[in-house]
Amino acid sequence: MIAKLLRLFPQLTVGVSLLLNSSQAARWEPITDEEHALTRSEIDPNAGAEVLYKFIEMDNESPDNSYRKYALRFKIFDERGAESVRQFRMTYHVESSRLGQHSARIVRADGTVDEIDKSEFYNQKLEDSGANSFRAKVFTFPELNPGDIVDVQYRIDLLEGYYSPELFVDFQERWPLRRAEIRVRPATWVTGFNYVKWMTSKCNAEGMKRRGDGFYELNVEGFPASVDEPNSPPENQTKAWLLFYLAADGKSGDAYWKSQGTKLYREMERDTKAGSEVKSTLKRILKGISDDEEKLKAIYRYCVSEIVNSYHGEPGQLTPEDRDKLDSGMVAEKVLSQGFGTPKNINTVFCALAREAGIDARVAALSNRTDYQFSKVLTSIDTTMNGRCIAIRDGEGWRYFDPGGKYLPFGQLDWDEQGVVALVADKKKVQIHPVDFGKPKDSVQKSTAKFELSEKGTLWGDVAFEFAGHFDVAMKRTIDGKSSQGRIDTVKEVLSDQWPGASFSEIEISNATSPFDPLKINCNVSIVNYADVVGDRLFFQVNAFQKSAKPEFPESTRSADLFFRFPKTEIDKVEIKLPDGYELEAASAPRPFSYDRVFEYGPKLGLKKSTNTLIYSRDFMFAGTIFPVKHYEVIKGFFDQKHVQDQHSLTIKKKPDSDSAS
Amino acid sequence: MKVPRTITVLSLFLGIGISISLGAKSKAPDWLTEAAKAPDPEFDPKDKPEIVVLWDEGSHDFLEDGTLVSTIRYAIRIIKPSGVDRARAYAYYRDGSDKITKIEAWVIDKGGDIHTFKKNEIEDIPTTGYSLYSESRAKKIDGKSKSRTGTVFGYEYTQIEKSIFTQHRWYFQSIFPVVLSRLKIDVPEGWDVGETRFHDAPSATINVGSYVWEMRDLEAVKSERNAPYRSLKRSFITIDVKPPNDGRVKHSTLSFGSWGDIASYTAEIQDPQITPDAAIEAKARELTEGVDDVWGKVSAIGEYVKELRYASISMDLDQGGGYTPRPATEVFRVGYGDCKDKSNLLRSMLKVVGLNAYPVVVNATDNDRVYPDWPSPYYFNHCIAAVEVDESVDTPAVIEDEELGRLLFVDPTSSLTPIGELPFDEQGGLTVIGKHGVDRLIRLPQAPPEANKSVRKIISELLPNGAIIGTVNDQYHGKNATDERTLRLEYDEKEYQSAYERWLSEGNNSAKVKLRKIEDNAQSDRTFEVELEFAIPKYAKNMRNQLLIFKPAIISRRDENPYQTNSRTTPVRISPSLLEEDTLVYLPHGFLIDEMKEEILIDSDFARYEATLKQEDDTLLYKRSLRFNDTIVSVEDYPKLQEFYRKIIEADQTPVVLVRASG
């Protein structure tokens, strides 16, 4: 029997709790008195509906009788909840499965039952592209009212020889979930994938239990609905879920990661083996350099600037024939001989050159901050560590480099690969090490302006922006693929968000595609009505760069933890020459504040009397990366305070003895 | 394992064989080769298009039995990197009645190399995501991954249609520059082809049953904010094919020569479906028990039908299924339906209680779609009902028609629009009422600004430290009420409160909000009312405890001109609305008003803004109103519109200066 792998496709996970034949009438899990009596969700009293019961049974024990069964029961609490439980689509993969035993009903608050007639289930053809054809049964519920209970169930039978290698169950969807029951009997008949593994996140359960009949079972309860709030951590890290899968490697914990580290090492040795290309290249680029750090920098510079990265494949860099040759599995010798490669190829070359130069360089696998949080328990390197970089030994520890990453400076990884965990290739030992976050000083946005203010309230002058670290990488990646005019248009759009209604001229962009030099933007700005004019007074915000800034966290309450991409520094410097004949009135300065090296806000404001010019600067440093929601009030307080201080305003008034101000 | 290794080796050899055979130059069809030679048309380098359309050609060949065989050829050149997303071929068809007999696509790169897409790269996809069932599908070839700037992507497909419809449209212009656009129609002897031309579209060149329309080097149609659709002046033609009535024609049989034809067709396919059964009769009587007046009956039945679920089932589209409702009895039994199903059930139930209603076809998303010169059902994407009512019914959705009398329009699909009003996007649009003999378009009523107003009352206190606290009472009418209902349905109470906090924080520091009242009066005066308490820290700027400066427009203070672009080529449609706001501010003890603008009036033909400030003892009364009339601002008057917004931004931002009383 040839086992055919069936990857589960996204679908609404509803199903049945009882074995049914298609000829049988639907049988339903009895509704309890408690379920009948519910008038609002005990998990979230604001919820409009709740999933009372979610059941999934996946049985792959027999190659000719594999199936998945789903059942879902809702309670409707209000009109909003009724609207959310509307149309159901039960999707299946045509080439590998059939859907049947589908039924649905509404149990009204008074106990009457409305079964959805079989004729009301419609067949829908979805995408159809060769081996990937999907169909669905679709139906809609008629009028739903508060107090109604809705039941849906169906079964997907896999065709002979197919099995599901994994099951992912999300316990936090659009509604609170009261109770879930998951049963899985794996495909023990599949050769090569003989090991059963599973992992749960935020389930508050001991885990899956193996029953006498071979089913693994998980019973969990009490999950709130998922929430969608800005600055939230990635879903895989915040939501409750179960991942059940078959693995070829039965090792667990350190033993698994040791074997993966060894595998990485073997692959690295194969890919970085030094031949004539590596040796001659190294000789050329290290001429006259003896210090290891300088060698590393020279190698990095070579890899970034001399090998065409497929990332930089905009017209003119790589021909279609070149693109056809791209292969991330190439060895360093071949990449060097052809002069171009994928980001992974370039890292391979970097590693090969460094190793040939006598530096202990290794390939390392990285977890990702936007994906699963690394855990030794989840023994699947493809799932939890799908990033790659090069580790360089640094005393007892390691430093990490990614010359294949677009615009990444020496020693910096992408923001989502910092603050994670790395598995460093090693022949013998398991080498799992933390990868530090960057420092706030590594990612800096510097904004400088020299303005004049007219007595009509217009602010105009020259502004300059300079970016470093992650700011630099992000901005370059935003504009590098555009034409010169396209870049200017993009910059204009960004500036227009900052100063709506302003006009911009003489926009100059420097180092837009430089892998080494910081991106710089210079332009001239004119903002009509910047200052509010009332009688003889002008009233204006000093930090013009923050003129349109909104409070970062206006909501007074929050449900999700706070997630920030990277530590950063913002430096704003503003000079404003005041109109002749005007003087400051009751002026004050914004206040500095800080908190435990996480949040530092340092404004300075002065007046250069000789030119009647305000001199303002403001350094803002934020080292935060993630905070539990219980700290929301504190973090919100910092950002609110920053917003208030950024909005600091001054009043100037025409001097009594001033005839005119021109 | 040995077996897989053997397979791998075999695969390698196969791979070499395949690559050799593919190594031979692919060939593009002649039309595409010719298209690729065309230079780019001139365009403003500052306004570079994503793509240029090199070739846009449709050839429609009508067979003797009315079957339509169409060949579509289309080619683009990618100008900007974002244009690669346009390198996609779609051949739309109706499953069951149409056939796509061939679809091919090619990419020609800058160097002239040609890639021909293989059959296994053709996808077949549904084109409606929301329907319970739909026959609408498309064959698709995605050329994005093979395309870069400078490459030419082209495709060709052949489609066989067996439909009753005889009307066809062809748009010469696109939102991108077009080098060539051509439509060719071939009909058998004895057939007529009628053309109606719009916005400089050419006449046909005719040669024995073959009609050709062609335009070259066309500028892109520029879409501008709030431009009425017809003002875009996109060149297009409409074709009415008329086969002879000789019994040989099985398809292409449904002609529309007048608006009366469409009214009759609508009545013919809809009226037979409204016959009520005992269940409908019982429900209609139950809903109207004890109700004697017309308004009460329409309200009760209308609200019931509105609450039924919307679900679309699109079948028999080639036979006009898209316009034909399911029988009212079936819709009532299953408890859901689409727009025509729900309108039809509404009519059926009203009939039970003695009220007559007509089906009405409308455009639900754009009230400026209909060209009166070309009668066609193609303009319409939605169905509502017009109920004959008496004088007792007086709402914004009523018109007095000379021929049909007093009509109340009801949209039972829009569950958040109260009976008595129409969804905003439908208002003012031209419609066809499905009644035999009504040979004209009828305009839906457009509610005046007063019907879409927001009435806001703010009572607040400014504290010496600059904080402001207070209450807001917002009463929304018409469109604003519907928008608010939509928001409320989307959010739970906590999220709804957060939405208000975000709104009050705009242009201010973080606001704290506590909702006091949310009241939906959809079935009484049709308003939606929200009352809340708020607090905004450091709202007024405190200058060394000597001055307090604050803006009396506390919320929804404008700071961005929606019409910043100085050039404009199309008029601006202004939607009717009205804001009436009264704000009472208790001033902090020990401070006096030093400067304020007592009155600001900005008036124009299209809008009027008025703000007044009046001090009474220790309070300040700020009144602000902004009224937009239902009008179209011409291109010539566009600078006046810009200036109007500039002035109201300035007015909204004007502060009041308080000074600490000496002594």
Image (cartoon, rainbow, N blue to C red):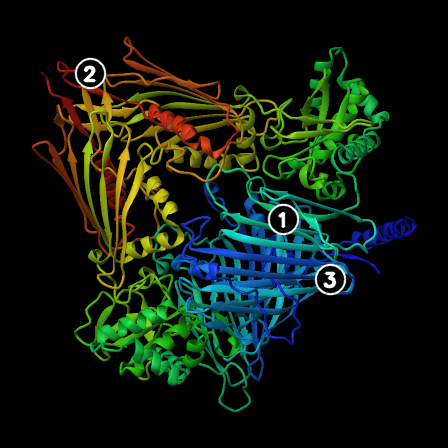
Q: Which residue is mark 1?
A: B151
Q: Is residue A137 above or below residue A486?
A: below
Query: Residue furthest toward the left?
Result: B617
Q: Residues within 10 Å of mark 3 (few under 14, many from 20)?
A: many
A262 left or right of B162 in image: right
The image's mark for residue A581 is: 2
Q: Position of residue A269 (x, y in %)?
A: 83, 29
Q: Is residue B164 above or below residue A291?
A: below
Q: Nearer the viewer, residue A497 or A482?
A: A497
Q: Is residue B569 above or below residue A561?
A: below
- Per the model, the C-alpha gap separating discs 2 and 3 is 87 Å
Q: Nearer the viewer, residue A376 or B388?
A: A376
| Residue drawn at the location 82% of the way across and 49% of the way down | A192
Question: Of the residues shown, which amino acid type is indicated by label 1?
Answer: Thr
Q: Is residue B652 above or below residue B31?
A: above
Q: Position of residue A628 (x, y in %)?
A: 50, 32
Q: Which residue is mark 3?
A: A66
Identify the secondary structure beneath mark 1: loop
Of labels 1 and 3, the one closer to you: 3
Q: Quadrant of residue B478?
A: bottom left
Query: Residue furthest toward the top?
Result: A610
Q: Nearer the viewer, residue A385 or B638?
A: A385
Identify the secondary structure beneath mark 2: loop
Q: Position of residue B515 (x, y in %)?
A: 29, 45
